[in-house]
Amino acid sequence: MPSETLVQLENISRKYYLDKTEICALDNVSFQIHKADFVVLAGPSGSGKTTLLNIIGCIDKPSQGKVFFEGTDITNTPIEKLNHLRLKNIGFIFQSFNLIPVLTAFENVELPLLFKGLDDKTIKNLVEKFLHRVGLMDKINEKPSNLSGGQRQRLAIARALAGNPSLIVADEPTASLDRKNAESIIELLRELNDEFGVTIVLASHDPMIIEHSRTKLFMRDGQLVSE
Ligand SMILES: Nc1ncnc2c1ncn2[C@@H]1O[C@H](COP(=O)(O)OP(=O)(O)OP(=O)(O)O)[C@@H](O)[C@H]1O
Ligand SMILES: [Mg+2]
């Protein structure tokens, strides 16, 4: 079992306010994510999975509690520094792929690497390596609209992985896919988890994903509950 801690959450709460009504999306949640683990956040709709994933992925901040990334307290880190931390360390995969429609497969994977300031040759090698790894070299010049759902998600995975992140967060990565594609995406993510030691945290209520995950966390009404 992996043991070093990548992300630690201490007594996290996240409240939203809608017309003066307070919604407590996360209620005093504490846990650790270990390096190289494959974690699923499961639970019914509205239980707080996306809210928690956004905090783990440093997209959002808690209303209360502390967040540590690789041992550093980032709870009060200013947004520019957090953006930098995200670019360097975290890859994202979404239900609806979030690819850029006017860019080719190559360019979609290339874009975050350009933001990182890598040189052209390194970028080309990385893009080709990861497109090859996810089985999309024959689609390298295609735009997302010419790819199937499964291929689009593979492209999103290549994009998330090419920057060598220590963490990939994936919100319902198979919810837009049929069973066969959903299974092959989960298989691919498990392989990449083993191959690169990248920590993967997914939100899903799909029993197939829950079964394939190493660590299973169940949520209900903004709290972690036992299975
Ligand atoms: N931006 C927001 N403003 C107000 N309330 C929100 C906001 N985002 C989420 N919520 C509320 O917070 C709670 C948790 O939502 P969240 O999206 O984290 O659930 P989820 O487990 O991801 O659900 P689903 O499975 O449907 O994606 C819900 O009650 C939701 O209505
Ligand atoms: Mg959600």
Image (cartoon, rainbow, N blue to C red):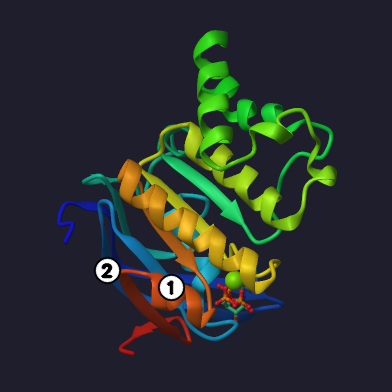
Q: Say whether mark 1 is within 8 Å of ligand 1.
A: yes
On the image, numbered disc 1 is attached to which residue? Answer: 41
CA gap, disc 1 and disc 2: 12 Å
Residue in the picture at 34% in, 41% down: 196
The local secondary structure at tag 1 comes to: strand
Q: Is residue 200 left or right of residue 134?
A: left
The local secondary structure at tag 2 comes to: strand
Q: Ligand 2: give its quadrant.
A: bottom right
Residue in the picture at 40% in, 71% down: 212
Q: Is residue 107 left or right of residue 10?
A: right
Residue 22's label in the rendered image is none
* Residue placed furthest toward the bottom: 227
Q: Is residue 198 left or right of residue 159?
A: left
- Tell me if residue 23 comes above or below residue 187 in the rendering: below
Q: Say whether mark 2 is within 8 Å of ligand 1.
A: no
Q: Of the two numbered discs 1 and 2 on the same chain, state the one appearing first in sequence.
A: 2
Residue 61 visible within the image: no
Label 1–label 2 contact, CB within 8 A? no
Q: Nearer the viewer, residue 68 or 128?
A: 128
Q: Position of residue 68 (x, y in %)?
A: 28, 51
Q: Nearer the viewer, residue 89 or 58?
A: 89
The residue mark sitting in front, 1 or 2, is 1
Residue in the picture at 15% in, 57% down: 3
Image quarter in which the C terminus is found = bottom left
Crowding around mark 1 (Cα neighbors within 10 Å: few <14, some 14 to 19, many 20+) is many
Q: Amino acid at mark 2?
A: Phe
Residue in the picture at 52% in, 18% down: 125
Q: Position of residue 144 (x, y in %)?
A: 78, 42
- Tell me if residue 207 comes above or below residue 156 in the rendering: below
Q: Amino acid at mark 1?
A: Leu
On the image, numbered disc 2 is attached to which residue? Answer: 31
